[in-house]
Amino acid sequence: MSVVSGYLVNSFGWRHMFIAEGVPAIVWAVIWWFIVKNKPAQVSWLSEQEKRDLDGTLRVEQAAIKPVKNYREAFKSPAVIKLCGQYFCWSIGVYGFVLWLPSILKNGSTLGRVETGWLSAVPYLAATIAMLLASWASDKLRARKAFVWPFLLIGAIAFAGSYLLGSTNFWASYTLLVIAGAAFALSVLYRPETWVTGVSGHE
């Protein structure tokens, strides 16, 4: 939506931009409420055999998960503690990137709102392409961990490099931000437990 945001803010102001971009999300939330089901047995687009097979697979997965009594017991698990730490650091990077990218671009250059919107969209385009390529390679190689932690590391290095360059070299700094955005987006291809265990729901 960054490209659209630039045009909306430039033409109508930021208040109208929030309204215009919020309406589709509200409409989709209503549609989601009615069309998305909780269990395979509730959907109409699967055959009865497919429903039974999927339901059986889900039961097997749940049976392999060790039950915990309460949150205190869960947080005694080293895997949970590591996951919390990794997810905390990842969230800071991702949400900082999403919230501050337009401001960073605007302050670091002489570009207007519309041009800033176009530049803000490039990291998400790069992330989309990278996700498709990484998903294909991950399924081909069956190496889930190799497609999580290296990209987190690349994203962190790119962020640090962009910060060190600052506004002295805008385009180099911006290129590193594009790399960082794409790399961090790749880390959400799999469920969060992949970061600790290497087990993925895409197996």
Image (cartoon, rainbow, N blue to C red):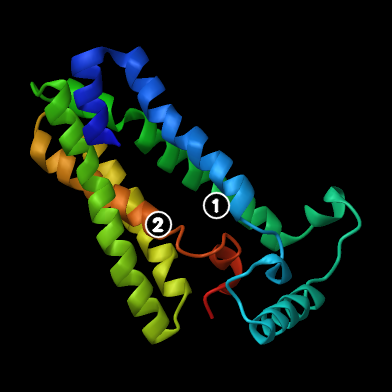
Instruction: Where is residue 181? Give x, y as percent.
Output: 31, 48
Q: Is residue 37 above or below residue 50?
A: above
Tell me which residue sits at (33%, 29%) in the image.
100
Q: Does residue 38 appear in the picture of this structure?
A: yes
Q: Secondary structure at mark 1?
A: helix
Q: Name the residue located 43 percent from the left edge and 64 percent from the top edge.
A: 149
Q: Nearer the viewer, residue 10 or 151?
A: 10
Horizontal and vertical percent for residue 56? 75, 82
Q: What's under tag 2, amino acid-wise?
A: Leu
**Residue drawn at x 29%, y 42% as measured from the top left:** 160
Whether residue 166 is visible, yes or no, is no
**In this image, 6 relative to 183: left or right?**
left
Q: Is residue 73 above or below residue 94?
A: below
- The residue labelled by disc 2 is 152
Count of labels in the image: 2
The picture places residue 176, in percent across and down from the top left corner, at 20, 46
- Residue in the foreground of this view, choosing between 138 and 46: 46
Quarter placement of the N terminus: top left
Q: Residue furthest front?
A: 44
Q: Is residue 168 left or right of residue 124?
A: left
Would you name the residue on which mark 1 appears? 86
On the rendered image, what quadrant is the C terminus found in?
bottom right
Instruction: Calculate the distance from the C-alpha at mark 2 to the C-alpha at mark 1.
Output: 10 Å
Contact? badges 2 and 1 (CB < 8 Å): yes
Residue 189: mark? none
Quarter holding residue 104? top left
